[in-house]
């Protein structure tokens, strides 16, 4: 089974987007680690790995259809952040962009009656709901707990606990 040229282009664009997101999270993790936010660093390193897995999921899907995926070069992500909160605001914005791209792909798959791609993309639709919710919840912690040094330390600790839970669940 083949996919349309348009759908192929959308999948290749999504591969690039997932690769960029992985690099962006890696940059955020590095900044967090150097800045002393060990919990956030662990959480964000996991996010970088997760985005890479999303990229590979698409690569394998395309290759299984007999359509060779294009592996993109990636531009260098920003590595300067003003605060831990700004890191997570940027992360949420990134996830929202991914959600828009996935939704566009679903729309095209529906329009083209590409049932295989439509079914494949449903996993990503669900994943994006979870990802946006996760980052919105983290950002709520800044409002609930605060932004002073003790509050930031507590948020960092909670992020570390989230990373440990994710590791244990896997």
Image: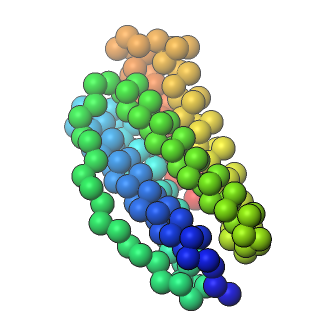
At 50% from the left and 70% from the top, the residue drawn is 9
Horizontal placement of 118 versus 131: left or right?
right
- In the rendering, at what x and y percent does residue 129 appear? 66, 44
- In the rendering, at what x and y percent does residue 20 appear? 38, 55
Can residue 160 be seen in this snapshot?
no
Colour scheme of the rendered structure: rainbow
Horizontal placement of 133 versus 74: left or right?
right
At 46% from the left and 78% from the top, the residue drawn is 69
Horizontal placement of 166 versus 43: left or right?
right
At 69% from the left and 57% from the top, the residue drawn is 107
Q: Say above or below: 43 vs 62.
A: above
Q: How many marks?
A: 0
**Between 76 and 134, the one nearer to me in the picture:** 76
The quarter of the displayed image where residue 147 is located: top left
The quarter of the displayed image where residue 75 is located: bottom left
Can residue 63 be seen in this snapshot?
yes
- In the rendering, at what x and y percent does residue 157 appear? 44, 29
């Amino acid at each position: 089974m083949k996919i349309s040229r348009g759908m192929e282009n959308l999948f290749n664009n999504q591969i690039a987007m997932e690769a960029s997101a992985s690099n962006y999270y890696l940059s955020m993790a590095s900044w967090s680690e150097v800045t002393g936010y060990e919990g956030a660093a662990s959480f964000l390193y996991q996010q970088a790995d997760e985005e890479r897995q999303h990229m590979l999921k698409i690569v394998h899907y395309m290759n299984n259809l007999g359509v060779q995926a294009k592996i993109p070069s990636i531009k260098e992500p920003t590595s300067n952040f003003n605060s831990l909160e700004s890191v997570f605001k940027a992360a949420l914005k990134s996830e929202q962009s991914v959600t828009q791209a996935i939704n566009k792909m679903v729309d095209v798959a529906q329009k083209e009656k590409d049932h295989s791609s439509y079914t494949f993309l449903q996993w990503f639709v669900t994943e994006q709901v979870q990802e946006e919710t996760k980052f919105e919840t983290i950002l709520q912690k800044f409002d609930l707990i605060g932004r002073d040094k003790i509050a930031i330390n507590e948020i960092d600790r909670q992020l570390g606990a989230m990373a440990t839970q994710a590791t244990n669940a896997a």
